Structures are given as structure tokens and as C-alpha cells.
Image: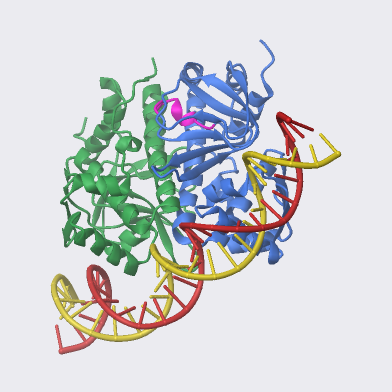
Chain colours: A blue, B green, C red, D yellow
Amino acid sequence: MMSAHPGLSQFLERIVRRSELKQAEKSAVLSLSSRPLQLRQNAGIIRPGDKTDEATLVAKGLVGRFDSRRNGDRQLTAVYIPGDMCDLHSVPVPQAGWGLVALSPCTILKIPHAEIRKAALDFPALSYAFWRDTIVDGSILSKWVSNLGRREAKPRLAHFLCEMGMRFETVDLGSRTDFTLDMSQAQLAEVIGVTAVHLNRTLQELRSEGLITSQQRRIEVSDWEALCRLAEFDPTYLLLARQVPRLP
Amino acid sequence: MMSAHPGLSQFLERIVRRSELKQAEKSAVLSLSSRPLQLRQNAGIIRPGDKTDEATLVAKGLVGRFDSRRNGDRQLTAVYIPGDMCDLHSVPVPQAGWGLVALSPCTILKIPHAEIRKAALDFPALSYAFWRDTIVDGSILSKWVSNLGRREAKPRLAHFLCEMGMRFETVDLGSRTDFTLDMSQAQLAEVIGVTAVHLNRTLQELRSEGLITSQQRRIEVSDWEALCRLAEFDPTYLLLARQVPRLP
DNA sequence: CGTACCGTTGACGGTGTTCAACGTAGGTGG
DNA sequence: CCACCTACGTTGAACACCGTCAACGGTACG
């Protein structure tokens, strides 16, 4: 077997973090064939409405999922980091309603749906694991609906920083209190659901209150506890703890 | 075989609408054992953080999924109608981060996770169909993130009415322009992400602009096209069209 | 007949938007 | 090497949407 692309190992680690897999199942994941691509910042990956027969795995950089309006406004509905499969959804549902864009310079792996389906068919535990992985995505979305609906800009931003801190720490790309979030303030605003102007002011508030310091794109959280309190952040929705039930 | 509860048939119809199933697979769904429950309005079904070993199927009425804040504010992150399985998620991930509440008087069916897992194990196509069903849920959430983040109250409400109209029509509980949405304005406000006071004013705007009429809890859409235009509503995200790929 | 829930209204204040402008850093071509 | 350009962060002022608080009327129900 050709040695797997490191991106596949990252993906496997992500899966295994939440689902117990046997050796054969792990090998099946590592032997998925993949087509690496380098992308410039703001490069489009999937346009809204596109039909695709490949899934997208992030190996390096940040990828955003977005929904756009007629007037050109865009809302980012997910931010993917290395090891994340952006559109595992597209395997059972190949017609995307959303778009994918490289938020920073990126390396991605394109993996044929057919391969993933075959793996899911050969190993029910994998099918189950992919299902569970999809639920993590939904769980994060659900939390974001709640944040957008009921919180003001400051706690919303705080919550996003907490979330990204935890996720980067989990994949060893920094610690929860010190990580690089390689996206512009305009892109951040598209996540938080405010204008770029207001995001800038909100970020300044967090800085002036001594919760974080940020220069360039590096975020240092000076007071993690206070940030979590402001955000009412409770990481259980990220489903980082491995859950029990496995297919027999 | 004992004759199945009608709720199970509704669920099967929902699944079959999006995934092609063979006879044996259909029977497996219909023979899931279920425990019916009658619920009063506002009765809690799952409290946030609860662990459960049963999934919840709506047979009659409306069920809401919510996330709540320390100050008591609540955001509804999903509204389920008859035929929907509220927490198919809970099968692979039994620890819920959210709560479920009866938005109206309800009949629900409790179905043991073990049964669903067994069905998924026996029939990979079912596992795949459940996965796909979970994605529908996520797709709706994704659209809601976009609505909450980028739209004002009026188009947001319009979008929700369009969505519910389509969904009720799909399950034959009315037409997209004439249906009963059995929830209070306060509950609606918890969906739209505004206060009850503002929701009331927004509803009046829709009425005074001749887009809808509503008395009691019955919604009549006077101008479907205009409502869709205001909402920028495009129903593809509901995944009502059956998608092709099936496990071989 | 009281109570509880629900829809409705008015006045006021705050959060976030809009529009316009400016500063800086990095990159490119003359 | 400097002029120019573009992307990005930053600031100010006016305004709009929406939240808050408080109150009132109708209806169902015990």
C-alpha cells in the first residue's frame, strides 16, 4: 500500500477520537485514495448548488462553508480546520446547497464518494462513525443557531474563540489559550453575523477588557475562565469525549 | 407482526421520500417497537444534558429542540412535525446537549436505541438512510444560521413560514399556503431569534403588507411568490427531492 | 369570578448598521 | 529605489432595528 497522505491520518485521528475502530477499519480509512490540491486564499472549492462526486478533506489551512444572499452578503456556517472532512454530507447527498471557500492558503484532499461509500459498505462501523461525525457538525451548527439568536456580538465572538481554541488544541495546532486563527476580520464578521466594522469594535472590547490579546492573526487568551464565563461556553457540544455505543 | 403504530408509517414515508428502500428494509422500520406517550403543551421530553437510550418520534403535534441560557432565555434550534424523528442523533450520540419540549399537545413514540442500531446493523441501506436523514436536519440548521446571521426579523419570519408551509404540505398536513402552526407567538419568537414583542410587530407587518393572514394559529399565505421573494426562499435545502446514490 | 395565558400597544434606550474616510503594510512595476 | 496599488484594520457620526419595561384587553378554564 502506498503510504497515506498525512491528511488522511489526521482525519483518522479525528474519527477515532469519537468512535472506536478495529485495525481493518482504520486501514480502510488510510487507504482511501486522495487527490491533493493547493489553494490560494479565497479560492472557491464548491459553489452553491454544485453537484460533486468527491468529498473535501482539509489537510492545512482553514476552509469555510457559506450561504450567500442575492445582495452579495455571505454567512459562514462552518469553519473547518485540518483533519476535518468539510462535506462528508455530500456522500449521501451530493447536491450541495452551500459553498466551500479557502479562508486561508490551504491544502485539501479530494476523496471520491465512491471510495467512501465502499468503505461504509464494507465496514458498518465506519458507516456508523461517519454518521456520528456528521452529528458533530450538526451539534456545532445547533449551538451557533443558539448563539446567533440569543446573544450579542461580544459573547458571540467570545464563544467562537473558545470553540476554535478547543478545536485547535484537540488537533495539536496550538493550545486553547494560544493559537493562530488565520482569517481576516471581514471573514470573522461573516462567522459572527455582524459587519466588519462592528466586529472590529467588538474585538477591541475583548482586548481592552483584558480577555485576549491579538496581533496579526495570533490569538492569545489572557483569561480563559473569564472568556468562557462571558461566552457561557460549555464544550460538551463539540463531542470531544468518546461516546460508548458501538455497533456490535 | 402486530400492526405498526401510524407514527411509524409516517416516519417510514419520510425516510422513503429521500432514500430508496427494499421491502425487507421497510418492514424493519415498521416493526420497530415503540412506546406511545401523550404530552401536554410545554411538557419537557428531554432536559439538556440528559442521557437517553430511546429516540423520540413525533406522531402528532409539534416538538421543539432548544438550547437555554443561564438567564432563562431559550432559543429553539429545530421544530419537528409529525413523521420527524427528533433525535435520531441520539442513537450514535446518546448524550444530548439540547432539550426537547412539546410545543403543542403531542403524541410521541419512544423507540429504543438498541432497536434502531440493530436495524442499522442488519441493513446497511438503513444505516445510510438514517445518516441521510440526519443531514436533512443539519441542512436546515445551516440555513438557519444563515438567516439568523444575515437577515432582519421580517425576512426571517417569512422564511420560517415558507419552510413550515413546504414541510406541512409534504406530509399532507395542509398546503404551503394554508396550514396550522400550533405554537404561540412567544414560541415563534424563540425560533426567529427576537423578543415576543418584536415578533408580534413583525407578524403584523406581514399581515398589513398583504402577504399572509393569520387568525388563531392558522396561517394563510395570500401571496406565496411575494413571501418567497422577501425570504429569498429556495426549498432545495429541505432535500425534498430524492437523491440518487444508494449503497449497492 | 378570579386567574393564567396570550396577543397587543406605546415610549424609550441600546446594540449594531451604514457610509465615508484614513493609516498601514506588503507587493509590483517603472 | 520609489510610486503605486491593494488588502486589511481602524475611526467617527447619523440612523435603524430591535430590546426593555409597563400596561391593557380578550379568552379559556377552574
Asked whether, in this view, residue A218 is left or right of residue A50, the answer is right
Indicate left or right for B184 with A81 as reference: left
Residue D20 point in image, percent of width and height: 43, 75
Q: Is A179 displayed left or right of B211 in the figure?
A: right
**First to last magenta residue range:** A86-95
Indicate the quadrant containing the N terminus of chain A: top left, top right, bottom left or bottom right.
top right
Location of residue B14 (image quadrant) = top left
Does B174 appear above or below A20?
Answer: below
Q: Residue at x 59, y 23 (%)?
A: A109
Image point 37% across, 40% down: which residue?
B112
Looking at the picture, how far across and down is residue A83, in whole percent?
62, 32
Near-viewer residue (A126 or B197): B197
Camera sees residue A80? yes
Depth check, front residue: D11 or B22: D11
* Residue A88 drawn in magenta: yes
Q: Residue lying farthest top?
A: A1
Q: Nearer the viewer, residue B99 or B31?
A: B99
Q: Is residue B59 visible?
A: no
Residue found 28% across the figure and 66% down from its top: B200
* Majority secondary structure in the magenta region: loop
Asked if residue C26 lies left or right of residue A145, the reply is: right
Image location of residue A28, percent across then percent down: 58, 18
